[in-house]
Amino acid sequence: MRGRSKVLKFRWDVVVIGGGPAGYTAAIRARQRGFNVLLVEKDELGGTCLNRGCIPSKALIHCAKVWQTVKNAGQFGVIAPEAHFDWSEMQRWANRVVSNLRRGLQSLLKHHGVTVEKGEAKIHGVNEVIVSSDDGEKVHTAKAVILAMGSSPAQIPCEPGASVLTEEQALFLPSLPKSIVVIGGGASGVELAWLFNALGVKVTLVEMLPQILPMMDAEVAEGLGQSFEKQGIDVQTSTKVNFVSARQGKTVVHTETVKIEADLVICAIGRKANSDGLSQLGINLNLDGSVAVNEWQQTTIPTVFAVGDLVHGSGTAHEGMMEGEWAVEAIARQFSGKPLPPAPKKLFIPVCTYTEPQALSVGLTEKEAKEKGLNVEIARFPWRANGAAMASALTEGFVKVIADAETKRVIGLHILGADAVNLNGEAALIVESEMTVDQAANIVRQHPSLSEGIKEALWALAGLPLHITKRPNRGRE
């Protein structure tokens, strides 16, 4: 390559490969431990989440929710007859949000003293990392390496000429088509389906499994599916896609039973870990290509750790960030010669969608609890009985609480409704702290607030419903 310099060599305590949420969290935590840290990123800091996933999608979803609010403003006495939306301006807003957060992340890493290098990183040997860029090659040696290379969208078979985009590419459409088929009913798929339907696109959502949101409580998933149907989204579950073809300017999705024609197809069937080449180094991979790790994120090479989507394929940013912290804790103990303690507590990772209504699952679903042989008690509280929800005309959905009938501890908390995602902190605290129903119910919540919906469901589970008359049951009604 023209202008390449000679190979330079550097030594570090920790080298982190990948600048997404899992990687940059690990880098900052390692610096806070006093380690000399290099963070290598081949693209933009923030990874998929910040640049092509979580952040731009949530910014666009917020824009769509504003549009929906304006369209329905008449019921609140706000008249806006000339209101319209501009897709290109919505994208500019999302781009500004991403740019501001990226600059903030750059400043944050600099403030903490993390050295950032842009380039393609490859592990060579156990503790050697070679970084290639337009300026040449640099060889970095490290006492420990944290792999955080993330994942890439999985693809589906399609013929040449078919208009098929990944979940990432769909966020940057130059214009809105008239019709879209979204393949995949996980979190990304349902969010994209809601987004484009809210903006007037005819949307069909196809999921191979019997329910959308397979990782969530079935009752919440079913409720969201019913809401989608009311909003005009055609939801087709238990529908397997075989391939996608092109026909007379349209794209056709071929399932086992029907053919669905649309202007555009969005493939949101999951993601695959970016683990190419790692097995040759002696790092064990799982059957799906994700990296095999122990409870401390340690790979089969003791000084090499893996976090985030590299471990899960399709994971969450918040789980990857926690794993980055665990990896640094393990490295700190390695450096000090201390043995690793018992594995960190396996946390319940919240699963959520930013649709309208929003969906949240924390802890065990009803199905999971019963599969574990637990005797459970269940109560629900509908948002139509909540004052804050009524005041905002956002009464769709419910809170569902699952408790162990023997210990009375809350083991699952699931919400379908407005702003459910922002109730995650309270829900996670109740489940992770193993609170009993009475302990969780005795926390005083602001009135009126959506948080009261959790309290009301807990009251119902305790046999003392206040604003509803139903008592707990041992399964779905």
Image (tube, grey):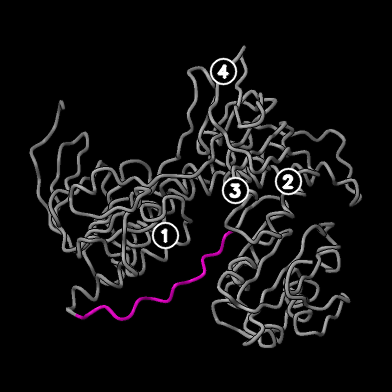
Q: Which badge, 2 or 3, is on the more N-terminal residue?
A: 3
User: What residue does disc 1 label?
Assistant: 320
Query: Under tag 2, what secondary structure?
Result: helix
- The residue at the point 74 percent across, 59 percent down is 417
Real-space CA distance between mark 1 and mark 4, rounded to the nearest whole angstrom: 38 Å
Real-space CA distance between mark 2 and mark 3, rounded to the nearest whole angstrom: 12 Å
Q: Are marks 2 and 3 in contact (CB under 8 Å)?
A: no
Q: Which badge, 4 or 3, is on the more N-terminal residue?
A: 3
Q: Amino acid at mark 1?
A: Gly
In x, y percent, where is residue 244? Answer: 55, 25
Answer with left or right where residue 357 lies relative to residue 469: left
In x, y percent, where is residue 460? Answer: 79, 79
Front-most of residues 450 and 257: 257
Quadrant for the N terminus, please.
top left
Q: Are marks 1 and 4 in contact (CB under 8 Å)?
A: no
- The residue at the point 81 percent across, 66 percent down is 382
Label 1 Cα neighbours within 10 Å, binned few <14 / some 14-19 / many ≥20: many
Residue 127 belongs to the span the image colors magenta: no
Work out which residue is located at the far top of the displayed protein and give it.
248
Real-space CA distance between mark 4 and mark 3, rounded to the nearest whole angstrom: 31 Å
Q: Which badge, 1 or 2, is on the more N-terminal residue?
A: 2
Query: Under tag 4, what secondary structure?
Result: strand
Nearer to us of marks 1 and 2 is 1
- The residue at the point 61 percent across, 52 percent down is 213
User: What residue does disc 2 label?
Assistant: 66
Query: Under tag 3, what secondary structure?
Result: helix
In x, y percent, where is residue 281? Answer: 18, 50
Circle on res. 246: 4
Query: Under tag 1, what secondary structure?
Result: helix
* Region in magenta: 338-351
In x, y percent, where is residue 161? Answer: 51, 17
Answer with left or right where residue 360 lies relative to residue 326: right
